[in-house]
Image: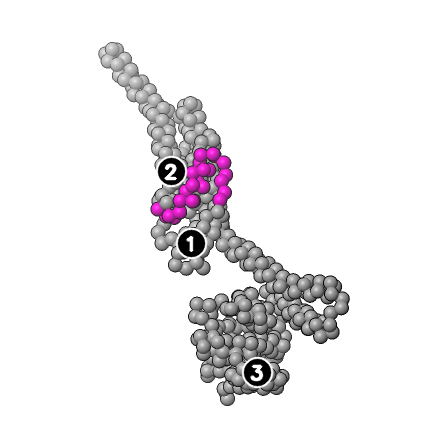
Amino acid sequence: MLIAFGVVLFLSFLFIACKIYFKKILQPIKRVGEHTRNLAVGRSSKGYVISGIRPVQQIIRDLQTVDERLKQLSSSVRVEEFSLKTILASMVEGVIVTDRVSVIQVANRAFVQMFNLHQDPVKRPLMDVLLQPDIKAIIDQALKSEKENVGEVVFEDLLDQRQRRVFQVSASPLVDAGNTLKGVVVVFHDISRIKQLEDLRREFVANVSHELRTPLAIFHGYLETILDNTELPPDEIQRVLHVMRRHSDRLNSLVVDLLTLSRLESGQIKLEPVTLDFTLLLERLKADWAGFFEKKQCRLIIECAPNLPKVEADTMRVEQVFYNLLENALKYSDDGKDIVAGGLHKNGEEYVDFYVKDFGTGIPSDKIGNIFQRFYRVDRARSRDKGGTGLGLAIVKHIVQLHGGSVRAESALGKGTTVWFRLPLKSPVD
């Protein structure tokens, strides 16, 4: 009996011990396991009651601390990722990141738009996206030297030279925290406009130098003639002085046109629009130019539509447009051939079309699109003989554009040329 009681007492003690063991050790360890699994999949472990033996309690506290730090790190990464995406999206330069074998890993929106890509470039080899070996060479050199490499790359459309685009490409090595090379960051900066302006500047300087050289050389030559021959006959002196005066006038016209064009292009000229009746304006111009037309034995014919509305425009600048067009028409027309100036308007339209038409030599179709460029001449020798500066039509274009209008020309060889310019009814100037 005593033995049986002892066995029962022992089993009871064992049961109680097991229950305490399960509660104090196994359950906390089970919570530790659940806590660890939650961390592994990124779930929060808040709400767990810290209990059990002290070592297990400490493990749970440490795991909760790790959880909080992971959340902070994850939040920081998301903020940095958002900031990076925002910066890349707002950049006007094209930016890509490639790995060591030139496969694109990141590309911003500007890069896609810059090269008009219809397919996502990410995860594609750079040479499949841009068939341009010069870019690959710049990147390869940056990878090889592990230093920034910069170069210029030209994209040309063989069918249309106006589509020529120039990019400054900068490739910088991308290394991780362990200073291991991972790839390159490539920045594309479109410098096409800068190159165009540089070309225009060089062309402008060359043209101005050329235009100035001829009259200055004539001045120099005739001055030497006068100085070396002090006893020239009076009639010869008069001839020399007349030549010098003619070239002096040419120089003056060139300087005036250059200053006018410079002020127009830089926005220094401000319009002073008033309401103009173009029928009256053209009749006034006809009277002003009567002497010039008499010398050419021709007439200026005015053809204004009866419904021609009044237009808000700067009187002096519009007259300058007609002066230049009439001067060109007279210059390149044969004696006896009339010139026509007029205006057209269609009901409901917010603009009026004006024109000056001659019946002269005309312009070849392949050159008609260039006549509004500075210093452009269809026939350089003939234009120079007639005393033109090569800036008249460029000035016309800028004045019309300043009014919010546009210019164009129509021509046929042997049949003459018509220059059109369109002005809005309302001036763009407040």
Q: Amino acid at mark 3?
A: Lys
- Which residue is located at x 49 percent, y 78 percent? 360
Measure how far apart labels 3 and 1 are at the Cα level.
48 Å
Q: Secondary structure at mark 1?
A: loop
Q: Quadrant of the C terminus?
A: bottom right
Residue beneath label 3, please? 296
Q: Position of residue 103 (x, y in %)?
A: 37, 41
Q: Residue furthest bottom?
A: 306
* First of labels 3, 1 by sequence position: 1
Q: Amino acid at mark 1?
A: Glu
Residue beneath label 1, please? 156
Q: Is residue 7 above or below residue 80?
A: above
Q: Amino acid at mark 2?
A: Val
- Which residue is located at x 27 percent, y 13 percent? 6
Foreground pick, 12 / 25: 25
Task: Name the main secondary structure of what is drawn in magenta.
Answer: helix
Q: Give, as a single range, the part of the protein colored magenta.
A: 128-151
Q: Which mark is residue 101?
A: 2
* First of labels 1, 2 by sequence position: 2
Q: Is residue 126 toward the left or the right of residue 252 in the image?
A: left
